[in-house]
């Protein structure tokens, strides 16, 4: 029997790559995002391989989260896998120069959004006494870097929540995997620099960064491990990276 996965932030980057990878191994998909046109395009593409439905909501809004997930048809109510991928980085500046709107966006998306979606999904997983939650953290959740204090704090929260989930949910046979990518070439830097393509491009110059599908491969590895194995925590760097801001460029 095919499993069903709910993926947040599924319209691009790691979320999209994960959806594509899951479709290859016959996992049905509930794709979540804010861009309805992209959701429809991806649904059309992946429906050729597996069953796909979409939910259009913002993880930062708990009312939208609850309404969207509760609206799922009965055939989609049993969710085996949750990938908490939606998140964002806004700005790169000393804390004294930080923008309050940027701070709110990062804390609301990276921390509260993850909690809102998880809380909506967990009753079903507990009832069925099975499930697997994959939280996408970051190297920023393991080491703080200059000019990124609040983003790093939001990802450290993801790390702590992953640990806490594991303590609370293992008794219900729910696995928790925390994945912390290093430099991945996605829309991440474009969002951080408010659409400035030149600044975003420079982040990945002079070395081969990770691609979204590299992280998707790791997620597939984690969710297809034997029943008695939990991949608890994975830190993934490109070969040229040795720390959050230590990258050996050509």
Image: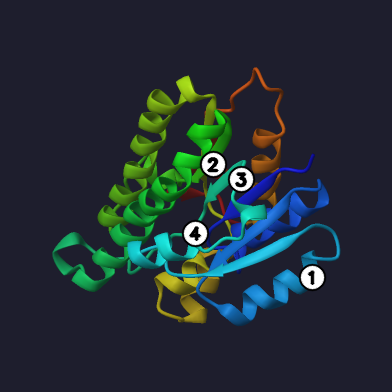
In-front residue for pair 75/136:
75
Observer-nearest of 188 and 69? 69
| Residue occupied by mark 2 | 134
Cβ atoms under marks 3 and 2 closer than 8 Å: no
Distance in Å between CA atoms under marks 2 and 4 = 18 Å
Cα distance, mark 3 to mark 2? 17 Å
Q: Earlier in the sequence, mark 3 or mark 2?
A: 3
Q: Nearer the viewer, residue 239 or 116?
A: 116
**Mark 2–mark 1 CB contact (< 8 Å):** no
The quadrant in which the C terminus is found is: bottom right
Q: Label 4: few (<14), some or many (≥20) within 10 Å? A: many
Location of residue 48 in the rendering, given as x and y in whole percent from the top left corner: 86, 65
**3 vs 2, front mark:** 3
- Residue at 32 percent across and 43 percent down: it is 157
Q: Residue at x 59, y 24 (%)?
A: 230
Give the number of the mark in front: 2 or 4.
Answer: 4
**The residue tagged with tag 3: helix, strand or loop?**
loop
The structure residue drawn at horizontal position 70% and vertical position 36%, both measured from the top left corner, is 221
């Amino acid at each position: 029997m095919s499993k069903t996965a709910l993926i947040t932030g599924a319209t691009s980057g790691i979320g999209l790559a994960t959806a594509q990878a899951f479709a290859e191994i016959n996992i049905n998909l509930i794709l979540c995002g804010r861009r309805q046109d992209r959701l429809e395009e991806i649904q059309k593409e992946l429906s050729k391989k597996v069953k796909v439905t979409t939910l259009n909501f913002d993880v930062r809004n708990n009312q939208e989260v609850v309404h969207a997930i509760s609206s799922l048809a009965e055939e989609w109510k049993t969710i085996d896998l949750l990938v908490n991928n939606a998140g964002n980085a806004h700005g790169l500046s000393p804390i004294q120069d930080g923008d309050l709107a940027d701070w709110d966006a990062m804390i609301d998306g990276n921390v509260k959004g993850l909690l809102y979606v998880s809380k909506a999904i967990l009753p079903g997983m507990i009832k069925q006494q099975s499930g697997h939650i994959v939280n996408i953290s970051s190297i920023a959740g393991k080491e703080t870097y200059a000019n990124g204090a609040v983003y790093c704090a939001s990802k450290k929260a993801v790390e702590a929540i992953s640990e806490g989930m594991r303590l609370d949910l293992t008794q219900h046979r729910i696995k928790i995997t925390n994945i912390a990518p290093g430099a991945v070439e996605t829309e991440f830097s474009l969002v951080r620099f408010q659409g400035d393509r030149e600044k975003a491009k420079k982040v990945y110059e002079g070395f081969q960064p990770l691609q979204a599908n590299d992280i998707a491969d790791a997620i597939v590895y984690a969710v297809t491990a034997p029943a008695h194995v939990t991949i608890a925590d994975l830190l993934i760097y490109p070969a040229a990276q040795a720390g959050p801001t230590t990258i050996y460029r050509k």
